[in-house]
Image (cartoon, grey):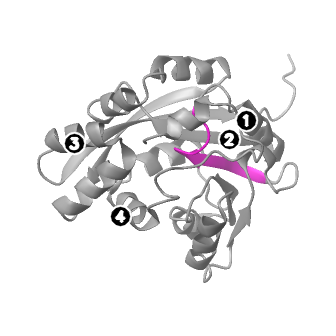
Amino acid sequence: MKGLVRAALAAVRATDVLPSPNIWHWPEVYEVENRAQDVHGALWDAVRADCDWSGRDVVDVGCGDGFHLPLFAQTARRVTGVEPHPPLVARARARVAGLPNAEVLAGPAQRLPLPDASADLVHARTAYFFGPGCEPGLREADRVLRPGGALVIVDLDGTAEPYGPWLCADEVRYNPLDVEKFFQDKGFALRRVRALWRFETRADLEAVLRIEFSAKVAERAVAQTPGLAFEVGYRVHTRVKPAGLLRP
C-alpha cells in the first residue's frame, strides 16, 4: 500500500488520477497478489450479502487489470470496469475479451463514463476511496446508481493485525479511525471482514510485501510472517441509494 494513501491525502492532480504505485509499476506481481488474496471468498460473501449482483448491472471502479470482472460477470447482467491508467485498461480488456456481458472503459472515479441511473452496484476495492478527499467519486457513484442500488467500498482495516500496523507505519498521516468516521458520517454501514492471503511460494509472498510497503516496513512484514499465509482485515462500507420518498 506504499504511497497509496499518501496520494489520496494529497491534493488531487489536474488529471484527477491518483497513481497506484503497486499495480501500475508491478502488474505481474500484483496478479500474484490478487490470486493470493481472500482464498476462501470472505470478501465476496460480504459484498454479496449486502448487494447480490445476480442479474444486475455492476460497475467496478478502479478495476485495475480487471481481475475481479470475470467473477462479477458469472452472474451479473452486465459488468463494466472503469480504470484511468491506459496500460491497465488494455490488460483488463484482454482479460474480458471472451465475456459478452463485460466491458472496460477508460476514466477516473470523479468522471465515470456512464449515464445516470445505469447501475445497481458500484463496487470499489482498495481503489480511490480512501476517506476525506474522495467526495467527487462518491457523488459520481450516486449519479450512476439506480434508486435502491448500492455503493460498496472495500478498504483495508488499519486497526487489524498484522497488515493494519504495517500500513499505518508506512503512512504516518493515515488515521484509520478518521477514515472510518468519514464513511460513517456519509451514511455508510460497516462490516468487518478477515480474509486469508495464501501464496504458492515464499518468494511470491515476499515480492508482494515489497511492492506494498517501503523497504523498511516490508522487511519488518517479511520477518513477522512465517510460512505462506496470513490474515488481512478489511472494512466493507455499504450505502444504499434511497428508492424514493418515505411516506407516513
Of residues 224 and 68, the one drawn nearer to the viewer in this rendering = 224
Is 43 on the left or on the right of 123, as rendered? Answer: left
Q: Is residue 187 above or below residue 36?
A: above
For label 4, the residue is 32
- Which residue is at the front of the view, 217 or 154? 217
Q: Where is mark 1, residue-wise?
A: 138
Q: Which residue is mark 3?
A: 219
Image location of residue 23, percent across then percent down: 49, 57
Which residue is disc 2 drawn over?
150
Residue 47 is left or right of residue 145, and the answer is left
Residue under the point 68% across and 41% down: 150
Neighbour tally class for label 3: few under 14, some 14-19, many 20 plus, Cα within 10 Å = some
Work out whether residue 130 or residue 49 is closer to the camera in this orientation and state it. 130
Name the residue nearer the viewer: 216 or 69: 216
- Mark number displayed over residue 10: none
Type of amino acid at the residue the image marks with label 3:
Glu
Whichever of labels 2 and 4 marks the residue nearer the N terminus, that label is 4
Residue found at x 65% / y 17%: 185
Q: Are marks 3 and 2 in contact (CB under 8 Å)?
A: no
Of badges 3 and 1, nearer the viewer stands 3
Foreground: disc 1 or disc 2: 1
